[in-house]
Amino acid sequence: MPAALGAGALAAAGFAPLGWWPLTLVGVALLTVVVQTAPRRRFWLGYLFGVVFLGLSVGWVSVIAVPVAVALVAFESAFYGLLAVLVHRLRSVPGWPAVAAAAWVVVEWVYSSVPFDGFGWSRLGYTMVDAPLAGLYPLVGVAGVSFLTALGGQALAWLVLRLRRPSGRRGRGRWRPVAVVLAAALVLGLAGQLLRGWVPAAPAGGRQVTVGLVQGNVDGVGVAALGRARTVTNNHLSETITLMARARTGTIAMPDMVLWPENSTDIDPLVDPTTRRTVELSVQIADRPVQVGAVLQGPGPDERQTSALWYDPEQGVLDRMEKRDLVPFGEYIPFRDVLLPLVPMLQMVGAQSVAGTSDGLMTVPVAGEPVGVGTLICFEVAYDGTVAETVGSGAQLLVVQSNQATYGGTVEVPQQFAMTRVRAMESRREIAVATTSSASGFIGADGSVVWQTAEFTADSHSWTMPLRTTTTPAMQLGPTIGVASTVLLLGGIAVALWRRRAARGEPAQR
C-alpha cells in the first residue's frame, strides 16, 4: 500500500508546476512492480494509486466544492484500479510492456470520453512538455506521447522485475536487456530533441497578424471571483485603454485585433444596455476588432452560453461561436431535474449552460482581409477532438480564451498553460492566450513561452503571429492511436486468457 501511494505521488510530480517528468516514469514503473508483487490486491492497489495521482493533479476542483472533488477523484480512481488488473494479467503476454502501455492509452481514452464527455486532464502525455519526447507531439499527438511515456515506465518495470528474477546467467548476458532498453530510450530521446525545434516555415510572403491581448483582472476570489456585476468588463475596458496607449506611443506593436478572455463580460452584452455600451466603448477606443468572451442568456429559459463574440468597430457583432466542451457540475448539471432537488448545493452552478455545435472557426476581417480565427475556450484545450476539429476547419490563427479566476492560486493555472503549450507543439501553431486574471501570454509554435502575465494582475501586450495553413500528422491522426491501442490491448488480453487456460491444462475452445 505505501508503494502504491508513493507511485501515485511520483506520477503526479510530472505535471506542472513541478514538471519533474522523470518521476512520472518511475511512478508508472513502481505501480507495475507493485501489482506484480501483490496480485491479489491489484485492483485496490491501482485504486489507491489513482486516489493520490488524481488528488494531487486535479484536487484543485475542491475550489468549487470539496464534495465535488472527492466524488471526482473517487470515481476516476476506479479506472486506475482496472488498469492495475490489466497490467497484471498482461504480464504473461510476449512483449507485455508495449501491451501494458496500450492499456494506459485506452484507459486515458475512456475516462477522457465518458461519462459526460469525460475529464481527461491527467494524461501522461501532458507531463512531457519539457522532456525530450516533446519533439514528437506534432507526429503522434498527446495520445502517442502518452503511449511512449507509459512504455518507458513499463520498460523500467520490466528491467526491475527481470533483474530481481533468479537467473543462472552471469556476466554480459544478464545485462544485455538493460543495454537494449537504454539504447531504445536514447534513440527516442534524441529523435524528440532533434524534432523539438522543428517548425514548418510560414508561407513565403505570407500574412501576419499582430494580436493584442488583455488580462483585465478580477475583484473577487474563488467561485465569486468575477466580483460585483460588470466590474470584470470595466476592468477589461481599463486595460484595453492601457494597451492602446502603449501601442500608439510605440511601446509595443500596434495590434490588428484585440483578444479578451472568456467571461470578460459576466452579463449578456446583447441584452444588457450598460454592458453593451462598455464593450462598444472598448471597441471604439481600440478602433480595431475585439474578440470578446461573453456569457449570453438563452437559448431557452434558465439557460446560458459561454461565447466568443467578434466585435467590429464599424459593424458591431459580425460572428460568434459557443463553447463546445462544458464541465459537468461546473457549468451544467447532468440529469438536472433529478439531481437538483436531491443535492441543493448544485444550485451554485447557476443557469444551465448549453454546448455549442460549431467547429471553432470564425472567418472574420482583420486589417481588411478575411482571417480564419480558431478559438478554444478554456477546458477545450484538454480535448483532442476539439483541438483537431478547430485546426482542421481551416484555422490560420489559434487563440485561447479562458476564465481561471475561480482556480487562481491553484495548480490548475500552470497545468492549463502547460497543456496549451502542448497544443502549440502538437499543431505547430503559435497561440495567443487571454485569461481574466491568470497566465495569459503568447506561445511559440515550438511550445516556447514568448511572454506571460503574472497571476492576479492587470496586464496587456501584443505580438505578431504568422497565419499558418499546414496540418501536422498529429492533427490528422484523430482517434487512430486510441483505436490501435485498443486493438493491441484486446489482442494481448486474448493471448493472456489463452495462456492461462493452457497453463491450467484446459483445452482451448474451438
Image (cartoon, grey):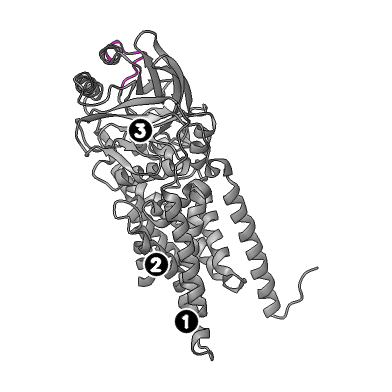
Q: Amino acid at mark 3?
A: Ala
Q: Which residue is mark 3?
A: 432
Depth order, front residue of 34/144: 144
Question: In whole angstroms, how far apart are the C-alphas of marks 1 and 2?
Answer: 16 Å
Q: In the orientation shown, which residue stands out farthest toward the right? A: 510
- Residue 34 sits in quarter: bottom left
Q: Is residue 457 visible?
A: yes
Q: Residue at 50% of width from left, 36% of height from top?
A: 386
- For residue 26, which numbered disc appears in the image? 2
- Label 3 Cα neighbours within 10 Å, binned few <14 / some 14-19 / many ≥20: many
Residue 24 location (% of width, % of height): 39, 61
Give above or below for 240 relative to 172.
Answer: above
Q: Earlier in the sequence, mark 1 or mark 2?
A: 2
Cβ atoms at labels 2 and 3 below 8 Å apart: no
Q: Which residues are magenta?
A: 267-275
- For residue 266, which numbered disc appears in the image? none
Cβ atoms at labels 1 and 3 below 8 Å apart: no
